[in-house]
Image (tube, helix red, strand yellow):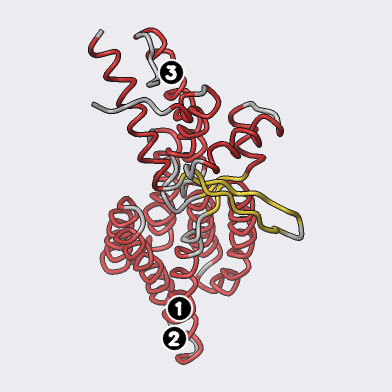
């Protein structure tokens, strides 16, 4: 039976992983764009991204676009697998109730 | 200690997942090819209509008519890359630019002044070759669109020479615009 993931379970991180998991494996999303789409603050998103990055669930790439610093975020293969397992565990809880 | 959740909490979490996925799917839909199809569909309507009303000599303005399309495509690409970036995103442009250079511009340079209608049909077929390649490689709808428009080009050129330019506006440019609307409004 799939198990819940404590890191992903936190509501904001769950939404972040759901959003990043919707992209194709080679796509990455801009930090500011993700913040806007998930309606989060810089600090809030940054803190949760750090937690996910520390767990190896996302990859963060800092780069320059037109001489401006940009941060792009993508779900890693481990993150996609963990998220799929977490969602399967949530579904299993509902199914067995 | 393993995490324990009630079915209600699990349902709430799944609802959050669905909301975030829906929001991102909307974003992804915005990043599909419909802007390019609209831009180039409009350009492919404008060019033959110009020739239809002004005569075959109007083909000399076709490059000028393409210019806003090139600028608009570059602007769309720039905005989209700032939101969602992918190392593969330049591939379709590379394929299209390569085919235009090798299959459209080089033959024109080598052959000099070709028959305007035959050359326009040929240039459009070369672009549809790019659609077919990208359809096999990137997204399947481009394959069917490329094959359909290529068939329409051949029908117009061989069977309907009297209304060739009008036919090209309707059945080469038109399908691009309509496919753009289909992708924008019908795909989930």
Query: Would you identify the image quadrant in which residue A31 lies?
Result: top right
Label 3: which secondary element: helix
Label 1: which secondary element: helix
- Residue B161 image offset from top left, x and y in percent: 34, 67
- The dot on residue B13 is 3
Tell me, yes or no, whether dots 1 and 2 are on the same chain: yes
What residue is drawn where x is 52% and y is 37%? B27
Q: Compared with residue A94, is residue B59 higher up or lower down, i.e. above or below? A: below
Callout in the foreground (2, 3): 3
- Residue A44 image offset from top left, x and y in percent: 67, 29
- The dot on residue B104 is 1
Would you name the residue on which mark 2 appears?
B107
Q: Residues within 10 Å of mark 1 (few under 14, many from 20)?
A: many
Q: Residues within 10 Å of mark 3 (few under 14, many from 20)?
A: many
Q: Are marks 1 and 2 in contact (CB under 8 Å)?
A: yes
What residue is drawn where x is 43% and y is 13%? B12
Counting residues from the start of the chain, the first of labels 2 and 3 encountered is: 3
Tell me, yes or no, whether dots 2 and 3 are on the same chain: yes
Q: Left or right: where does residue B55 sit relative to residue B11?
A: right
Tell me the distance, in whole angstroms, between the alpha carbons under discs 2 and 3. 59 Å
Chain hosting mark 3 = B
Callout in the foreground (3, 1): 3
Tell me, yes or no, whether dots 3 and 1 are on the same chain: yes
What residue is drawn where x is 43% and y is 75%? B99
- Residue B5 image offset from top left, x and y in percent: 38, 13
Counting residues from the start of the chain, the first of labels 3 and 1 encountered is: 3
Label 2: which secondary element: helix
Tell me the distance, in whole angstroms, between the alpha carbons under discs 3 and 1. 54 Å
- Residue B177 image offset from top left, x and y in percent: 45, 47
Query: Would you identify the image quadrant in which residue A50 lies?
Result: top right
Q: Are marks 3 and 1 in contact (CB under 8 Å)?
A: no
């Amino acid at each position: 039976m799939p198990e819940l993931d404590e890191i992903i379970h936190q509501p904001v991180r769950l939404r972040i992983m759901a959003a990043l998991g919707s992209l194709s494996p080679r796509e990455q999303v801009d930090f500011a764009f993700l913040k806007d789409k998930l309606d989060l603050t810089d600090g809030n998103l940054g803190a949760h991204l750090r937690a996910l990055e520390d767990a190896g669930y996302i990859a963060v790439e800092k780069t320059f676009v037109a001489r401006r610093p940009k941060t792009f975020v993508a779900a890693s293969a481990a993150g996609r697998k963990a998220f799929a397992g977490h969602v399967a565990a949530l579904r299993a809880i509902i199914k067995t109730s | 200690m393993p995490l324990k959740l009630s079915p209600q909490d699990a349902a709430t979490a799944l609802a959050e997942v669905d909301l975030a996925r829906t929001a991102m799917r909307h974003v992804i839909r915005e990043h599909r090819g419909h802007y390019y199809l609209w831009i180039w569909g409009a350009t492919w309507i404008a060019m033959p209509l110009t020739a239809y009303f002004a005569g075959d000599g109007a083909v000399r303005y076709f490059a000028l008519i393409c210019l806003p399309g090139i600028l608009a495509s570059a602007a769309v690409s720039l905005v989209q890359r700032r939101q969602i970036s992918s190392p593969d995103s330049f591939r379709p442009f590379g394929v299209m630019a390569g085919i235009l250079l090798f299959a459209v511009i080089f033959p024109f340079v080598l052959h000099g002044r070709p028959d305007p209608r035959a050359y326009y049909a040929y240039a459009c077929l070369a672009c549809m070759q790019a659609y077919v390649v990208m359809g096999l490689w990137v997204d399947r709808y481009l394959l069917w669109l490329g094959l359909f428009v290529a068939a329409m080009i051949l029908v117009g050129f061989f069977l309907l020479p009297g209304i060739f330019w009008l036919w090209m506006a309707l059945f080469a440019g038109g399908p691009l615009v309509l496919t753009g609307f289909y992708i924008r409004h019908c795909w989930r």
